Image (spheres, rainbow, N blue to C red):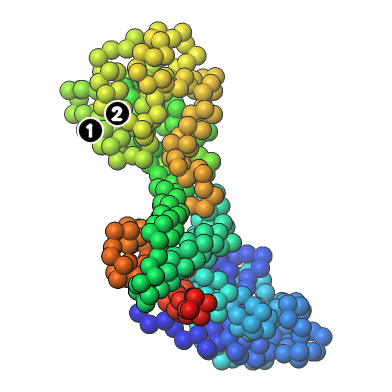
Amino acid sequence: MPLPPSDDTISAIATAPGMGAIGIVRLSGPRALEVASRVFRPASGRVVQDIPPGRATFGHVVDGDTLLDEGLLLGFRAPKSATGQDVAELQVHGGTALLQAVQAACLRAGARAAGPGEFTLRAFLAGRIDLAQAESVQALVSARSDAARRHATLGLTGALSARLDAIQRELTALYAAVLAVLDYPEEGVPDAEIAEPLERATRAIDELLATAAAGRAATQGARLALVGKPNAGKSSLLNALLGYERSIVSDEPGTTRDYLEAPLELGRVTVTAVDTAGLRETSDTVEASGVRAAERLAAGADVVVALVDASRPLDASDVHLVTRLEGPRTVWVASKADLPPVWPDDALGARPLRVSTRTGEGLDALRATLEETLVGDAAASEVWVVHERHEAALREAREALERARFAPDDLRGLDLETALRALGAITGRTEVAEDTLAEVFARFCVGK
Ligand SMILES: Nc1nc2c(ncn2[C@@H]2O[C@H](COP(=O)(O)OP(=O)(O)OP(=O)(O)O)[C@@H](O)[C@H]2O)c(=O)[nH]1
Ligand SMILES: [Mg+2]
């Protein structure tokens, strides 16, 4: 799909549809201020083009001779604006019909209706932000959880780009060294000069890749399944974690028949918590299918909370549950910890967290353990890989570096180029190859 032109003047309603205190129509392009001057009359009588950049001016918003609203005009001059172009912002009252009328007036005055993301695209093309930051803009406005919002904010600062820059610098220097060997094979390059930087770059990529699962959990929401025997306290625990009564609780085993879901924030990650029917063999067919669904959910979950009632003796089915669900993604809970325990902590092998939904005991520890289980190795890194495109590019670069490690001298350069191109695609710096050539050239001058 071809990109839209970026040298004309575009206009769009910048605020969300619906009623609001303020609505904004934004213009960007060489004629932004000229278009603004046709739809805005400063109360001071000044000419729009003469208003100092960044200074808000009060006046009338008009369509021809028709008054639309009173409002503010804010203008910026290229290249000192968000898009790197002339930009004008009309701030009016936040009514849908009004904003549509202001937008229509701008179009009549010579602007083109902007397509999706065109302002951000222009910011990228002008070099104001890189591609990863542009993606963070989109992630920020679409973030539905605080966890997703935090990562988008961090992405906006270029934190990932800075990490990638460091890796790219290392690989570019290495690439130059590899090419130099080809030109001056008699001089050679000590193996360590290649192996060590390769290893450092690989490790840095691995550190980023190790955050991808947590990144998904932070932005898309991981799945948490609550499983255990009927009456173990699963629905009570879901409600306690959520802080409201989402699921029906009763002392009747088999209360939860179907399964139900609720979004749950756990610090740096968000999960969809799934309450399931109690796991047991049963002759009741409705419940039997619920049990199968629970087992499937546990298998497909990113983290499983497995409950065993601490107030009742363990039986064969508890042992069965433990052996079926044991694993690094399973968190064991001894439920109803407020009642006298009838089995010791180590009876299950894995030591369970003692939790009571009556007293609140163990709930904070459970939250922390769940977050930790989902965050895993990503805890060490502030920057998480939250976009699948970035993860795929990092994997491609990683594979190319792996090949480079064992490649003969004359092929190693190609693998390094592949890795650099993959990393460059994340930030959208397609001139990576030019950078690389410049570095190679500089090296020749110095070396020989
Ligand atoms: N004393 C005590 N009772 C609890 C606790 N948690 C749950 N219960 C009781 O245990 C019974 C079963 O709770 P539920 O949350 O419905 O259990 P469940 O695992 O969802 O049960 P099913 O949906 O039937 O599989 C209810 O009577 C709860 O009030 C707890 O921490 N302490
Ligand atoms: Mg239940």
Picture layout, residue 283 above or below residue 329: above
Residue located beneath label 2 in the image: 325
List x then y, in percent, for residue 366: 48, 29
- Residue type, numbered disc 2: Leu
List x then y, in percent, for residue 410: 30, 71
Asked if the residue at label 2 sits under 8 Å from ligand 1, the reply is no
Residue located beneath label 1 in the image: 292
Query: Is label 2 in a helix, a strand or a loop?
Result: helix
Is residue 106 toward the left or the right of residue 272 in the image? right
- Residue type, numbered disc 1: Arg
| Label 1 environment density (alpha carbons within 10 Å; few <14, some 14–19, many ≥20) | some
Picture layout, residue 127 above or below residue 325: below
Is residue 264 toward the left or the right of residue 54 in the image? left
List x then y, in percent, for residue 79: 64, 82
Labels in figure, total: 2
Q: CA distance from mark 1 to mark 2?
A: 14 Å
- Residue 337 in sight here: yes
List x then y, in percent, for residue 129: 55, 71
What residue sits 44% from the left and 31% below the top? 238
**Closer to the camera in the image, 346 or 119:** 346
Picture layout, residue 164 above or below residue 122: above
Is residue 83 toward the left or the right of residue 77 in the image? left
What residue sits 22% from the left and 33% below the top? 292
Please report whichever mark, 1 or 2, sits nearer to the chain's N-terminal start. Answer: 1
- Asked where in the image residue 276 lies, by quadrant, the reply is top left
What residue sits 26% from the left and 27% below the top? 324
